Amino acid sequence: MGIMNVSEAVEEAILKSKKLKEGIIRGHWKNIVEKLSEKSEPLWIKEGILYVVVEDTIYLHHMSMNKNKYLKKVQETLKVDYVKDIRFKVSKVQKCDYSEFKYEKIVIEKKEEFISELKELSLEEKICILKRKAKEREQALELKGYKKCSVCGMMFLGEAEVCKLCSLKDVKDKVLEDKDDNE
């Protein structure tokens, strides 16, 4: 493998990382499902299936009817045919606009400065700067009321100690254990 620039490294990381794909989908959820973004939330991707919670059965039915449209938009967003299906489940939706951090003017100006800073640095220096920026972002989210999940480390809004994803995965794992015990 030869030397690659930062953007190529990021694109390669996106292709390899499930968590990055999930984050991209969350960030673009409003563009994917439009008005229903406040009534639904993408959770995770497992074995090519995107799991989504929906506020109630009316929205679940509507989204199920438009599943192919949403699937196409997800694939266009990821620029890769990674998600093969979408499954919906009725549950409480955590209202969070992930894009609110993306479009603030200050953030855009800082992003341009940040990119120009990185051009002349070594890979080790770039990694140190990225770690520092991630820590600054985490601190900014904490000021907005976010907490760090004790299981996965993701920042989330809520009163619980773990994020919604980890709590649902824990419930699913317990159900599967009970099912195995009963067989």
Image: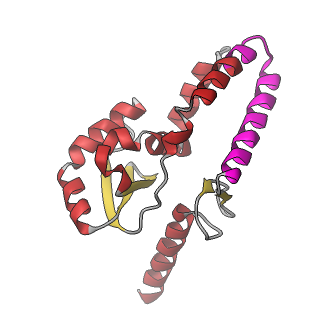
Q: Quadrant of the C terminus?
A: bottom left
| Quarter where residue 131 is shown | top right
Residue 181 at x, y percent in the picture: 48, 86
In this view, the residue in front, 6 or 174, is 6
At 39% from the left and 39% from the top, the residue drawn is 82
Residue 10 at x, y percent in the picture: 59, 27
At 48% from the left and 47% from the top, the residue drawn is 97
In this view, the residue in front, 177 or 42, is 42
Q: Main secondary structure of the magenta part?
A: helix
Q: Is residue 53 magenta?
A: no
Task: Give the extent of the magenta segment.
Answer: 115-143
Residue 51 visible (yes or no): no
At 64% from the left and 24% from the top, the residue drawn is 111
In this view, the residue in front, 150 or 55, is 55
Q: Is residue 130 left or right of residue 162?
A: right
115 to 102, vertically: above or below: above
Q: Is residue 134 magenta?
A: yes
At 52% from the left and 32% from the top, the residue drawn is 103
Furthest residue toward front: 105
Furthest residue toward left: 65
Number of marks in the rendered image: 0
Q: Is residue 178 left or right of residue 5?
A: left
Residue 178 at x, y percent in the picture: 47, 84
Q: Is residue 98 left or right of residue 142?
A: left
9 to 141, vertically: above or below: above
